[in-house]
């Protein structure tokens, strides 16, 4: 393997490299949108942890969070932004190329 | 509950996401109940085709139900699951909107199914159809494998194994193709229905216990 490919590993996006955030981003990449409760149930992360990680992803501009309603039920809807999709794709290419 | 780590570590984020979503999709048992109902309906209508006299009114009704009612039931069950989840389970399992169906992928699957259907029809026309017992065994093995691959959970692997064994046993026995299929679909439908209800009850009880 070329040293360039290995060296690219050091340049992966650290925001989504963290396992819990990678799990959230990967899940959101597979759906159109999901609410906080679904992410909590599916990932198995604690609500506190999930909230912190979602905030970090939102700050980075990778995830868009919108408060809404479905009937009487309050929803905190999360979806991946275009930037989030682009970063995940780039991350995937780097990992795939190196491993 | 875990902290800041994967429940199932997988190198590929896509595969990890698919596995997690598959588990979430099957956590309330509703898909199994729907599959169970559809399989029992199939078994019932096939049985009607076997026992009802050809040309009778009841036979015509069952044939129409087989042609139009069954596909409607299969498609309607997906809609019903979505409605039930939104009406009663959204607060427990959360809300998710899946991506629109991938048309390219659907076209590939439909083309493959059409090609297999055409090959079987051509073989039948040429008189090269294998014995009926092969079909029953094949349905059992193929259905069992499909259940295991699609379910990705221990109960689906067990169910898939039972279906494969049942198919082989029925194939080796002297039942006709229709009777073999009725028994196979009946067994799998009942198994799926019971399993789905048990999972649903455990799911409701578990959520009530943690107060979510």
Image: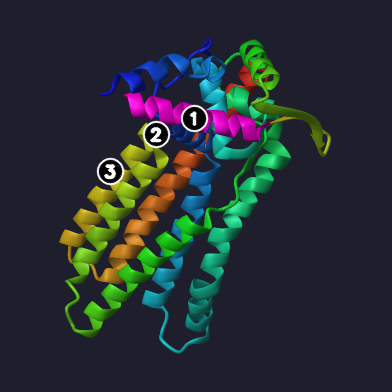
The vertical placement of A49 against B117, above or below, is above
Quadrant hosting residue B68: bottom right
Tag 2's secondary structure?
loop
Which contiguous range is marked in magenta?
A: A79-99
Q: Position of residue A28 (x, y in %)?
A: 59, 32
Q: Main secondary structure of the magenta part?
A: helix
Q: Residue at x 50, y 54 (%)?
A: B37
Q: Is residue B48 among the parts visible in the rendering?
A: yes
Q: Which residue is mark 3?
A: B161
The front one of B23 and A63 is A63
Query: Residue B48: image x %, image y %?
Result: 43, 73
* Residue at mark 2: B153
Q: The N terminus of chain A is located in which quarter?
A: top left
Instruction: Give me the chain letter of mark 3.
Output: B
| Towards the viewer: B25 or B13 | B13
Q: Is residue A90 magenta?
A: yes
Labels 3, 1: front one? 1
* Element assignment for label 3: helix
CA gap between label 3 and label 1 equals 40 Å
């Amino acid at each position: 393997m070329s040293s360039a490919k290995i060296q690219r590993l050091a340049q992966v996006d650290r925001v989504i490299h963290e396992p819990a955030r990678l799990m959230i981003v990967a899940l959101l990449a597979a759906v159109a949108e999901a609410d906080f409760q679904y992410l909590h149930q599916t990932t198995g992360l604690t609500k506190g942890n999930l909230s912190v990680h979602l905030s970090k992803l939102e700050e980075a501009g990778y995830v868009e969070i919108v408060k809404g309603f479905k009937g009487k039920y309050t929803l905190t809807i999360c979806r991946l932004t275009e930037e989030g999709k682009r970063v995940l794709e780039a991350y995937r290419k780097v990992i795939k190329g190196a491993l | 509950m875990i902290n800041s780590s994967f429940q199932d570590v997988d190198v590929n984020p896509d595969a990890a996401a698919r596995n997690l979503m598959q588990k979430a999709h099957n956590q309330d048992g509703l898909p199994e109940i729907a599959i169970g109902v559809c399989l029992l309906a199939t078994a019932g209508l096939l049985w009607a085709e076997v026992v009802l006299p050809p040309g009778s009114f009841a036979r015509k009704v069952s044939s129409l139900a087989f042609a139009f009612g069954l596909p409607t039931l299969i498609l309607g069950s997906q809609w019903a699951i979505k409605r039930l989840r939104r009406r009663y389970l959204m607060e427990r399992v959360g809300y998710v909107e899946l991506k629109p169906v991938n048309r390219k992928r659907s076209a590939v699957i439909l083309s493959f199914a059409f090609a297999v259907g055409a090959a079987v029809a051509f073989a039948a026309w040429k008189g090269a159809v294998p014995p009926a017992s092969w079909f029953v065994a094949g349905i059992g093995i193929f259905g069992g494998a499909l259940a295991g691959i699609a379910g990705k959970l221990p109960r689906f692997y067990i169910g898939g194994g039972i279906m494969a064994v049942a198919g082989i046993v029925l194939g080796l026995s002297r039942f006709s193709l229709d009777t073999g299929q009725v028994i196979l679909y009946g067994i799998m439908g009942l198994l799926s229905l019971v399993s789905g209800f048990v999972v649903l009850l455990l799911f409701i009880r578990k959520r009530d216990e943690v107060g979510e």
